Image: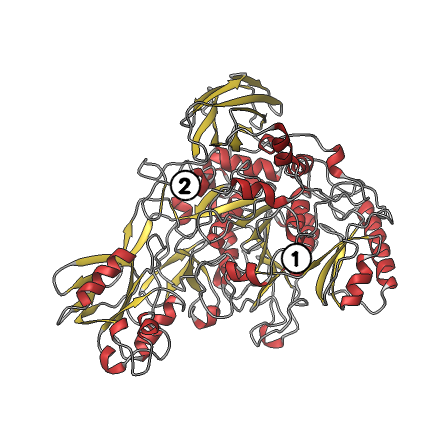
């Protein structure tokens, strides 16, 4: 999910998909069912399939704790793992697992799963895998996969943008004012589970909270986890009343490096950064090396507790460890999970299933939407909140002044200026025997010191990491660097480079290149300045829709939050030594997701009876599609943004506290949605869940946005809203019809008592909308008490089909058929 590899050893999303393709036979969803072996004539693992040797996640037929009818929570309630029923069911699952393992002696599980999945992971020979696949209790074998982190690190400690202030959490009307104890106690009683690269609890943003804690009894009542200090004595983790849990999942790592410590300690900085973004302590002094700037930094919920689950290592993030971490986090009692890691674009598979059952167990899951740009959004499951990355209102800018008097401003940070000196194009400064095309990229050992010494060097972006280019300029004796994009529309970053630098766009770079070719070309660089910028804008790297799995019948991503130039905690020496202090700056949807996780912690602390989907709805229906200047949200390059970029819009947590109405949904709704797309969830007893699932169109999922990816003439969809306010209200609807469509809503007036629900139908009719083009609008329910419950509508006209073709479209079990037909 990283669009440009930040350093060697971390897979890009493209590489991950090529090297470890998703298996078509991935684990399907589980629903409530008795513990019963699958019929001997109907094993879910494919009979006759050839399984090579490898590490496999083996799913067994019985339902895990989160979904079994004896232990699953009631809709809207949290899973209680401390009951007698849960203990009894764990014993039944262990007995079944032992029976399966006894049939194939010698298998030693690396992980066992029992809360969000039922099964185990083990290293299997080809013969062992084949024998297991024939067992009637085995429903699937899924080969271990490696996923990338969803960050795009700038490796830059810079200033301290106040994202909490930018999001409207502060001030007289901000959400913190409604929290007993204010910002300092925001998130009290809540636990966030962070699945990432681990954590550095020595970071000052993770120091112990003042005692006594007013929420101590609440935490003690729900927390069932522990703190594993690790087996590496040099990197042991010590927990406190802030970082209350730490676990690591290294069993599936094939070749640990000397930085893959057997410990939850963070070697990378990514996990410490995401954790402190969501729940770092209040007003921690943050000195930012390389800039001369200092300030304070706070997480969104300074009083929340953190439980860390280290699942990412030098090779990437192992799917078997990720599932084990979900299993453990749900059992431990976390309220919210932050997942800034890749997952793929699928509705089935072990990780997506674990997410499904975590949500069913009452845990809110915030996940990064990915960093591969438009059309690449993930995860696509409706039970997960997929978060796009936006900018905040502070930009860091450096000015490049050419000898002819022309000035250009680009992204840059640093306290040092460079006086006017020679300007050299790296393509014209190749050392003897070096390829000029490689020198243009400022690759290792390609620059001629005699040409570069004392000069500002123009380097082209691509191949090697941005900061590695400046390191090569410094090694050759250069005084500064101008980095320019290889193509138009790429994101620019304020990196702390080895020499003073500025990052400019492609057009600017080509203009500078032309000037550098003239005799006597010179240039100078200013020191960086922090300036206000219109915000939010959607980052160029941020993954967008449409969702290919539903053909656009579910709008993804769900929402946007700050994910560019975010300052939070880091680990000194992290990112291969790029971070030298305790706080630094990163960019990526990895950084956006913990903002939503923090908002969810706040809302759950204030509304403990809200389900994860109610929290999601509250954030989405109160989001904004306008920037802070009142104009529409744009992309980072200035082009208009659409809901395919930002979903419902930029989150406004202070409004989400009182949304009026919410669109809730349950696991039964999610199963109906999956079945409507032609997938077959596994129920655990060998039965066909789709045979009894409610028959719906995918667009009928009770989601806060309305999307139809193949509207052929006319289509009606229904939605149900629930009043979460303390008083009855009368709502009337206002419609902003997508261009080229007529929209009617029935009824146009809803009378909803507190806790009651009401259903309405919206009918879309194509008039003159172009086929294959997306059009956007909204419908908003308003009452007389200030509530405005806004649902984005996204429609794409499709040509009419024959009845036979339509049946295939909706019912084909080939998951790729629909996405292939509807891809833009």
Q: Residue at x 64, y 71 (%)?
A: 254
Q: CA distance from mark 1 to mark 2?
A: 33 Å
Q: Is residue 108 visible?
A: no
How far from the left and from the top, in percent, is residue 343?
58, 53
Q: Is residue 762 left or right of residue 532?
A: right
Find residue 325 and name its label. Answer: 1
**Mark 2 residue crowding within 10 angstroms, few (<14) / some (14–19) / many (20+):** some
* SS assignment at label 2: loop
Image: 662 above or below 254:
above
Q: Is residue 743 visible?
A: yes
Find residue 164 and name its label. Answer: none
**Mark 1 residue crowding within 10 angstroms, few (<14) / some (14–19) / many (20+):** many
Where does label 2 land, which residue? 168
Image: 703 above or below 490:
above
Depth check, front residue: 52 or 489: 52
Depth check, front residue: 394 or 502: 502
Q: Is residue 63 left or right of residue 327?
A: right
How far from the left and from the top, in percent, is residue 362?
66, 42
Q: Residue at x 27, y 79 (%)?
A: 477
Q: Which of the marked residues, 1 or 2, is nearer the chain's N terminus? A: 2
């Amino acid at each position: 999910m990283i669009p440009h590899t930040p350093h060697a050893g971390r897979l890009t999303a493209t590489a991950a998909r090529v090297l470890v393709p998703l298996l078509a036979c991935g684990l399907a969803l589980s629903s409530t069912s008795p513990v019963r072996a699958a019929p001997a004539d109907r094993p879910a693992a494919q009979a006759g399939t050839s399984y090579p040797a490898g590490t496999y996640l083996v799913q067994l037929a019985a339902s895990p704790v989160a979904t079994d009818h004896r232990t699953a929570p009631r809709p809207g309630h949290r899973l209680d793992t401390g009951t007698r029923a849960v203990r009894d069911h764990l014993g039944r699952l262990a007995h079944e697992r032992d029976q399966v393992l006894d049939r194939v002696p010698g298998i030693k599980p690396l992980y066992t799963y029992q809360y969000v999945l039922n099964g185990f992971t083990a290293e299997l020979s080809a013969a062992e895998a084949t024998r297991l696949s024939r067992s009637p209790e085995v429903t699937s074998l899924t080969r271990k996969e490696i996923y990338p982190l969803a960050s795009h690190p700038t490796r830059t400690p810079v200033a301290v943008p106040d994202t909490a202030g930018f999001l409207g959490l502060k001030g007289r009307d901000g959400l913190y004012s409604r929290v007993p104890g204010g910002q300092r106690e925001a998130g009290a009683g809540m636990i966030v589970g962070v699945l990432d690269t681990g954590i550095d609890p020595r970071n000052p943003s993770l120091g112990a909270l003042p005692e006594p804690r007013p929420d101590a009894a609440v935490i003690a009542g729900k927390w069932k986890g522990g703190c594993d200090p690790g087996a590496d004595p040099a990197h042991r983790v010590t927990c406190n009343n802030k970082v209350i849990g730490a676990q690591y999942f290294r069993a599936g790592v094939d070749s640990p490096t000397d930085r893959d410590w057997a410990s939850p300690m963070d070697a990378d900085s990514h996990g410490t950064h995401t954790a402190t973004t969501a729940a770092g302590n209040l007003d921690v002094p943050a000195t930012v090396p390389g800039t001369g700037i200092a300030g304070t930094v706070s997480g969104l919920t300074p009083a929340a507790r953190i439980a860390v689950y280290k699942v990412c290592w030098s090779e990437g993030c192992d799917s078997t460890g990720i599932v084990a971490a979900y299993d453990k986090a749900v059992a431990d009692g976390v309220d919210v999970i932050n997942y800034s890691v890749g997952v793929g674009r699928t509705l089935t598979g072990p990780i997506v299933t674990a997410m499904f059952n975590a949500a069913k167990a009452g845990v809110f899951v915030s996940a990064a939407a990915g960093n591969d740009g438009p059309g690449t959004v993930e995860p696509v499951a409706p039970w997960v909140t997929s978060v796009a990355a936006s900018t905040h209102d502070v930009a860091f800018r450096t000015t490049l002044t050419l000898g002819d008097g022309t000035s250009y401003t680009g992204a840059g940070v640093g306290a040092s200026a460079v006086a006017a000196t020679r300007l050299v194009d790296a393509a014209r400064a190749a050392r003897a025997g070096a390829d000029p095309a490689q020198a243009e990229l400022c690759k290792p050992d390609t620059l001629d010191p005699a040409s570069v010494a004392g000069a500002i060097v123009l380097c082209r972006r691509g191949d090697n990491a941005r900061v590695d280019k400046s390191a090569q300029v410094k090694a050759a004796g250069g005084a500064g660097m101008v980095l320019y994009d290889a193509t138009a529309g790429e994101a620019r970053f304020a990196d702390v480079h080895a020499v003073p630098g500025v990052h400019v766009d492609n057009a600017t770079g080509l203009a500078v290149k032309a000037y550098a070719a003239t005799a006597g070309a010179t240039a100078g660089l200013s020191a960086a300045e922090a300036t206000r910028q219109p915000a939010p804008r959607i980052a160029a790297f941020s993954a967008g829709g449409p969702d290919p799995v539903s053909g656009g019948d579910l709008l993804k991503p769900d929402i946007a939050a700050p994910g560019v130039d975010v300052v939070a905690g880091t680990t000194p020496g992290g990112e291969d030594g790029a971070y030298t202090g305790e706080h630094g700056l990163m960019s990526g949807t990895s950084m956006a997701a913990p903002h939503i996780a923090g908002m969810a912690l706040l809302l759950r602390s204030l509304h403990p009876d809200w389900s994860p989907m109610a929290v999601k709805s509250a954030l989405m229906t109160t989001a904004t599609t306008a920037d802070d200047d009142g104009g529409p949200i744009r992309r980072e390059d200035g082009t208009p943004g659409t809901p395919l970029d930002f979903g419902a819009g930029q989150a406004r947590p202070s409004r989400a506290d009182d949304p009026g109405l919410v669109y809730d949904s349950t696991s039964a709704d999610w199963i109906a949605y999956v079945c409507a797309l032609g997938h077959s969830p596994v129920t655990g007893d060998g039965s066909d869940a789709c045979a009894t699932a409610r028959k719906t169109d995918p667009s009928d999922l009770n989601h806060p946005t309305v999307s139809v990816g193949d509207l052929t003439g006319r289509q009606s969809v229904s939605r149900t809203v629930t009043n979460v306010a303390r008083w009855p209200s009368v709502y009337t609807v206002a419609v902003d019809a997508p261009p080229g469509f007529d929209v009617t809503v029935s009824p146009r007036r809803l009378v909803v008592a507190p806790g009651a629900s009401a259903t309405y139908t919206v009918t879309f009719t194509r008039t003159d909308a172009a086929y294959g083009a997306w059009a956007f609008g909204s419908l908003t329910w308003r009452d007389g008490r200030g509530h405005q419950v806004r649902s984005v509508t996204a429609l794409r006209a499709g040509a009419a089909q024959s009845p036979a073709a339509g049946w295939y479209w909706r019912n084909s079990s080939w998951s790729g058929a629909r996405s292939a037909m509807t891809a833009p």
